[in-house]
Amino acid sequence: MIETALISAIVLGLVEAVKRTNKISEIYLPLVAIVIGIIISGIATMGGTDFLFEGIIAGLSAVGLYEVSIDKLKNVL
């Protein structure tokens, strides 16, 4: 569980870096987050059996964390 949270934080940072390059449309960023999550999860688990699902969960949770934080910031500002 802690590993998935750590992977989510790394995915969030990497997706933000990809977003700032302006090479990929914002529409595709959730897909990029899932792919990055799967890759990092595969590296972290050394190709174990659950890396695919763990990577998808990490990518989707990173996207959700980003969306919730942006929504809260818009309400504050």
Image (tube, helix red, strand yellow):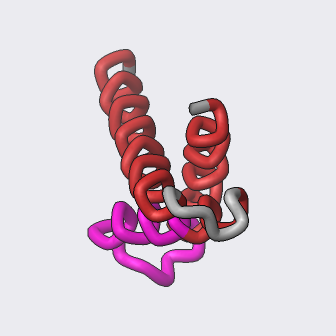
First to last magenta residue range: 20-38
Picture residue at 36% right of the left edge, 40% below the top: 64
Split into 4 quadrants, where in the image is the N terminus?
top right
Picture residue at 62% right of the left edge, 48% below the top: 7
Q: Is residue 59 above or below residue 62?
A: below
Outermost residue toward the front in this view: 49
Picture residue at 39% right of the left edge, 66% below the top: 29
Frontmost residue, 15 versus 7: 7
In-image side of 70 versus 42 (left or right): left
Frontmost residue, 66 versus 70: 66
Tell me if residue 34 is in the magenta stretch: yes
**What is the number of callouts on the image?**
0
Location of residue 31 in the rendering, given as x and y in whole percent from the top left corner: 35, 69
Location of residue 46 in the rendering, given as x and y in whole percent from the top left corner: 72, 66
Frontmost residue, 10 versus 47: 47
Locate residue 6: give its quadrant.
top right
Q: Is residue 51 above or below residue 70?
A: below
Q: Evaluate whether residue 37 shows in this view.
A: no
Q: Evaluate whether residue 23 shows in this view.
A: yes
In-image side of 67 versus 38 (left or right): left
The rendered magenta stretch, by its main secondary structure, is classed as helix
In-image side of 27 versus 24 (left or right): left
Picture residue at 64% right of the left edge, 31% below the top: 2
In-image side of 18 versus 70 (left or right): right
Tell me if residue 46 is in the magenta stretch: no
Outermost residue toward the top in this view: 76
Location of residue 49 in the rendering, given as x and y in whole percent from the top left corner: 52, 62
Location of residue 77 in the rendering, given as x and y in whole percent from the top left corner: 38, 21
